[in-house]
Image: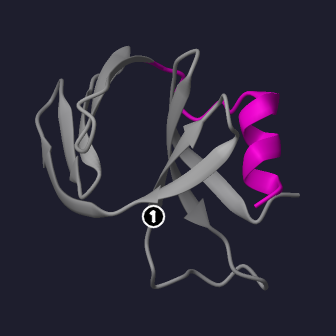
Amino acid sequence: MPSYECILFLDSELLSIIELKFIPLGGIDSAYGNQWFSINKTTHELSPLELRSIDSSDEIRECYFEQGFLKFSARSGTYIEKFNSGQHSLENRRANLSPEVAMIIDNH
């Protein structure tokens, strides 16, 4: 059983953005809160995203990270990388991790 719970899974062919809640041994709630990661699906690199702020409305949620900007709805999203201006269209798969992404997380 994984030691994390997937809160959000945004996915494309080349990139995934995930929000995870880590579950400490013994099941006691952690004071650390949720953590965000990007996954390069070509290299299988899992990189932490440093959350700076969140802005939410009924329909849209915007997350500002040190590494870029994420805007998403219940159906889709866009992630814009800060350093190379790469833009990724993402599908909101909610918390249903693909086996490929779960394996990358479990291996890190």
**Residue at (70%, 40%) from the top-left corner?**
44
Disc 1 is placed on an element classified as loop
**Residue at (11%, 35%) from the top-left corner?**
57
Residue, far front: 84
**Residue at (76%, 66%) from the top-left corner?**
3
Q: Name the residue type under label 1.
A: Asn
Whether residue 66 is visible here, answered yes or no, is yes
- Residue 13's place in the image compared with 55, above or below, is above
Q: Position of residue 68 (x, y in %)?
A: 25, 44
Q: Locate residue 104: give its quadrant.
A: top right
**Residue position for label 1:** 34
Residue 77 in the figure: left or right of residue 63: right
User: In front: 38, or 29?
Assistant: 38
Q: Where is residue 102 in the image (x, y as percent from the top left)?
A: 76, 41
Q: Is residue 93 magenta?
A: yes
User: In front: 11, or 39?
Assistant: 39
- Residue 41's place in the image compared with 108, above or below, is above
